[in-house]
Image (spheres, helix red, strand yellow):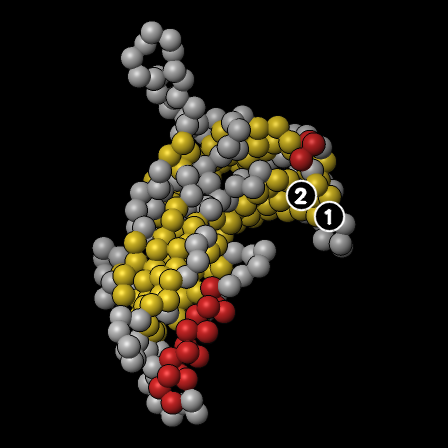
Amino acid sequence: MAQTTWTVDGTSLRNLAYNIESADGWDAYPGKRSSNPNIAFVQGEFSDPMKWYMSRDISLKLVVFDQSTGGGTGHPGGPRGQLQENVDTLLGLFYARDSLLDLRRMQANSAGSLIERQARVEVVDAFAVESTRRGDPMRTMVVQLRMPYPLWWELPLATQTEANITTTSNGFNIVAGGNAPASDMVVTFDATAAITDPRIEVDSTAEFVQYAGTVAAGSLLILDMHNRTAVLDDQVGGVLKADGGITFGHAWWMQIEPNATTAMTSTVQSASDYDLLIDRYDEWF
């Protein structure tokens, strides 16, 4: 933990008012789910190769002190007042209604460089605020968090642009890091001139997503691979869901393998002019 710093919605959890004593589950391998079939009179079950990661649970144990974040001790309510204010601050920090918290950690990688990773989390269990003995100037606070999307995003967001494509087929490579498959990717067709039936494909797996229709000049087709949504945006305020015109080769649309070079191809029905933008993160267990 010595090399790791944590923030929640931009607030540091490592200062002189409160500090993380231990964190569990943040670097664990998330469980998997699948539809392994059971067959009568056959031992066990048959393994279905298509498996998906489940949500991840994180437990943070914090120690809360009776001084300010900068180490000050001049609280009007004295040490007890400062301690209670710090507890109240943390309770308010982790409270969120109808939204996810932005959890980030900064940690040294295997090369010794500091990298920042981000996750969206929700509080799934009540806080436990305890004191070990009467008059103790510290409290311990345990908060249980859940990552609905179980992988960490490495910041910053990587944007790759294939500009001024004027052919019907355009091949390119994505060089990804991380150690987990990246499925949280957004692909945008930015039409300089009108394009018809735009398609994006991973060459090695035949995973593809295609829109059956025309993207007018000056408009965007935005394909969200994780949420599996398609939006047409004319950039003048007219935004329409385009899901009805979408076909795809796999239920999960597509994903990029970690620590590898992935060959991809974008196609349109006839020669035109458009830019292709791919927004993605390197993702980590």
Q: Is residue 173 visible?
A: no
Q: Which residue is mark 2?
A: 231
Q: Position of residue 224 (x, y in %)?
A: 57, 43
| 34 or 157, nearer to the observer | 34
Q: Which disc, if any, is residue 239?
A: 1
Specify which label sits upstream in the sequence, 2 or 1: 2
The structure residue drawn at horizontal position 51% and vertical position 49%, both measured from the top left corner, is: 279
Instruction: Inspect the image, locate mark 2, and give the three-letter code of the amino acid beneath it.
Output: Val
Q: How many marks?
A: 2
In the orientation shown, which residue stands out farthest toward the front? Answer: 134
- Give residue 196's quadrant in the image: top right
Observer-nearest residue: 163 or 1? 1
| Residues marked 2 and 1 touching at CB (< 8 Å) | yes
What's the distance in space between the residues labelled 2 and 1, CA to CA? 7 Å
Using the image, determine if residue 122 lies above or below residue 6.
above
**Placement of 159 over or under 2, stated as above or below:** above
Q: Dot 1 surroundings within 10 Å: few (below 14), some, or many (20 or more)?
A: some
The quadrant in which the N terminus is found is bottom left
Secondary structure at badge 2 equals: strand
Query: Residue at point 64% right, 40% down?
Result: 230
The x, y position of residue 169, in whole percent, is 56, 33
- Residue at x 47%, y 64% (from the top left corner): 94
